[in-house]
Image (cartoon, coloured by chain):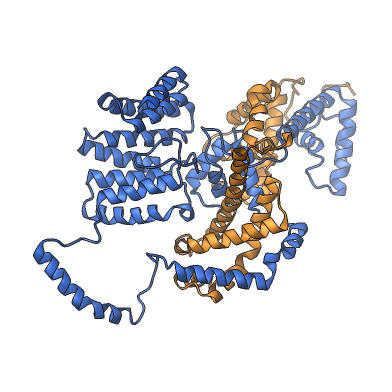
Chain colours: A orange, B blue
Amino acid sequence: MSLEELLKACAENGSAADWEEFVHRFHTLIAAVALRTAQRWGNASSTLVDDLIQDTYLKICRDRTRLLSEFTPHHPESFYGYLKVVTANVVHDHFRAERSQKRGSGQPEESVDEIPMAASSAMASPTEDPERNILLKEVDTALCSSLAGKEQTRDRAIFWLYYRYGLSAPDIARLPSISLSVKGVESAIHRLTRLVREKLTAGKSEVIPEAEGKRPGKTL
Amino acid sequence: MSRDPHHHLSPDELASLVEVESVPEDDVLRSDRTQAERHAESCELCGSRLRDQRSVQSRLRNMVASLPSKRKPDYPPADCPSEEKWMRLAAGLVSSQDATLLLEHATHCDHCGPALKSAMQDFNPELSEDERKTIRQLASADSNWQHNIAQKMSALSEGTKPERQLFQPQKPGVFANWMRWAIPLGAAAAIAVGAGIIWDYSSPSLASTNKLIAQAFTEQRPFELRFPGAGYGPVRQERGVNGPSRSRMDEPAELLEAETQIERALKKHPDDPGWLQAKARADLFEGNPESAIQELLQAEHAQPEDMSIKRDLAAAYYERAGVQPDAKAQTADYQRALDELSQVLAKNPNDAVALFNRAEVHERLGQHAEAVADWRRYLQI
């Protein structure tokens, strides 16, 4: 049965056999996202992950009329994207609800090392870290002055995602609008890094007289 | 081939010495590097250039280290796109145009950059061996568990057959079944027409559609502003960017129903300001402020004195402000929202929704005294 046929069967009839096939096909994907997202919240016990997986299936079933509308024959991977987002939302909703219950019940909320990102990022904000702020500005100026045209936005994004946030080249290549292979991203990072290095060090050392750097006389 | 020791290091040679870890090495390259390294050790100029470049490289590498290595999902700061946006981007569910806008924001935001990274990691199609092992050991990996959940899903499907099934093909027999009812129904319809009391099923009242939208807002409040007729609910999603921002999977059933009604009504009356306003509200809910603004402007043109349109227009500007790429455009949209709400309040000073919303807008514009004044007034109503 093709993916489209399966989704149609689940959306319209929803027999146990159809859903079993659905679960069989997508279990690894749903389980992986549930596991990773729960790990991010700091509790990925197998019992909880199983519960979250079950909640995800039930949510998909309740919203089954959307199965087909999320499926595009020419872009079937979008359906996998849809399942990932549904799963992650189920997990996030669970933990957020749990957290708000804790708040409401007067229980101790979180330990110090669990400071939410919104707060911790504020602490690490560039405005409060002048050295980092200066570097970011210098680098961005170097990038902007050396890149032009359509690619400038894309190349800057590649550079910053890689260096500032530590995304890997394969992750960057998977982003829509980047439109480059992993090799292409790696090559862009290499090229941009060299460009930034050269820009930021230009003028620091004595200028070499000739392009290929013929050494001045007997200085060895 | 050995390099001329009297030549300074070329840019390529310098790069090869700086990028020792990132460039794969073979014997020839290793030998070239050794010679270049020797030159740099003995040449003051090249040594200095190499140190400078290595220092820059090291500062670049340390940039990422200055952020927390593990982030925990949370609601984003007010001016940032929602967490869901980053998930949708990571899942490949946004258009290339939206992706460009989002990436531009992410590359300069220490909240959203890590949020995107987390989503990319969580959605990575490659599984580590540990992850495979953990997943295999889950109870849900067992075929009995899967059989049971499939039974539950089937029962759920039986119990709640969708009201409108998408892409439903015409099945044999359906026409025959329909015909069995068509004659008596036709007769009843004829009687109804005769009595002048026919109920047009495809055109439910605008009020009932707006009620459905208000219910959807109560169930999944998409932004901080109040919405007429909607009860209080926690903000589910704070911001959207232009284009569809919510996944259809998370839309409440009420909204889907409302959208169907709006679509039908607008087919019949494309310029009806009431239905245009309803469409705009649905668009607002879905995170499409741009479309909402266009529809509301059209509705406002037809009914310039309708304050509810201005109030919705303010909400649409407010929503769009949240996704503007630069501060200037953002402030301009907040200002537009403020102007619209001030017009509403000039006419109806006790409009609680408009007061609440204007206080929010003042907050966004950093006009805290004005916000406090509106809050106080709001509490008095």
Q: In which quarter of the image is the C terminus of chain B?
A: top left
Q: Is residue B270 visible?
A: yes
Q: Residue furthest front?
A: A105
Task: Please determine whether, in this image, residue B183 is positioned above or below residue B313.
Answer: below
Q: Name the foreground residue: B95 vs B231.
A: B231
Residue B304 placed where, x, y %? 22, 33
Q: Name the foreground residue: B152 vs A86.
A: B152
Q: In which quarter of the image is residue A133?
A: top right
Q: Residue at x 59, y 32 (%)?
A: B108
Position of residue B232 in the picture relative to residue A121 (left or right):
left
Task: Please determine whether, in this image, residue A126 is positioned above or below residue B107.
Answer: above
Q: In which quarter of the image is residue B177?
A: bottom left
Q: Name the foreground residue: A3 vs A89.
A: A89
Q: Which residue is drawn at 52% across and 44% down?
A: B99
Q: Name the foreground residue: B109 vs B146.
A: B146
Report the number of discs: 0
Residue B188 placed where, x, y %? 16, 71
Task: Please determine whether, in this image, residue A124 is positioned above or below residue A192.
Answer: above
Q: Quadrant of the N terminus of chain B?
A: top right
Q: Which residue is drawn at 48% across and 39% down?
A: B239
Task: Please determine whether, in this image, residue B154 is positioned above or below residue B22.
Answer: below
